[in-house]
Image (spheres, rainbow, N blue to C red):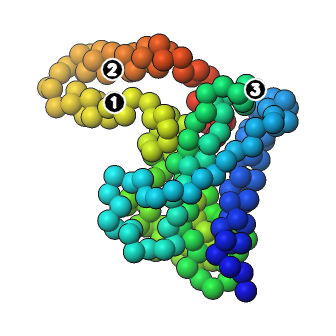
Amino acid sequence: MLNKNHVTMKTTTHILTILLLTITMSGQSNSMSSTKHKPVLQFTDCFLEDCSPFLDDSRIQYAYLTVPEDYEHPEGRKLRLAVIIIKASGDKPEAEPLIYLSGGPGGKAILNGRINAFRAHPFGENRDIILTDFRGIGLSEPAFCPEIQEEIGTVVTLNLTPAEATEKTIKIFEECFDRLIAEGINLNMYNTAMV
């Protein structure tokens, strides 16, 4: 019988392998795959805004995956990607987990409703399910301009003409973009191909 640490290590190894394969196969340069940086998965306490629905669920694990912003320059800025692992509920889980990739682009994967749905999903009986917020999104660090959703929601309530609403929305995005550039964020490293 396997102990919890062995299973956790096995899941961690699968997460890192899948993430590295995703990076390598996503059209990035060969030198990136030969970088000396090794992603680090660090387990932590619940980092959700509301942990109460999951406090008694030992199947849910919380972690941060630390990766470089730029794999070509791994000594530079580091990012912490939020990761949720929902352990399989069955007695004989498959070795390979199911990884949920949120769309959008820019959509959060780690939401209480989604965690709740996946912990009861039939796939979760035989496989661990892994959720992660991509770079700059949701609970990953840094999160870019988290106020944008609220500001855009406010624009909708202002009873503006379509042209005025478009102009105001573009201004919100431009302010975010300018702030990120001023902070030295390399926005070329924040895209679908990068994990």
Query: Which one is earlier in the sequence, the residue at label 1 or at label 2?
Result: 1
- The amino acid at mark 2 is Ile
Please name the residue shown 45% across and 53% down the image: 110
The C terminus lies in quadrant = top right
> For the residues marked 2 and 3, what is the alpha-carbon distance in whole angstroms?
31 Å
Q: Quadrant of residue 10?
A: bottom right
Query: Mark 1 falls on what kind of element?
Result: helix
Provide residue 17's location: percent of width, then percent of height: 75, 53
Report the front residue among 41 and 149: 41
- Look at the numbered discs 1 and 2 and tell me whether their residues touch, using CB distance below 8 Å: yes
- The amino acid at mark 3 is Glu
Above or below, 110 relative to 32: below
Q: Which mark is residue 72?
A: 3
> For the residues marked 1 and 2, what is the alpha-carbon distance in whole angstroms?
7 Å
Mark 2, residue position: 172
Mark 1, residue position: 148
Provide residue 8's location: percent of width, then percent of height: 65, 67
Provide residue 30's location: percent of width, then percent of height: 85, 32
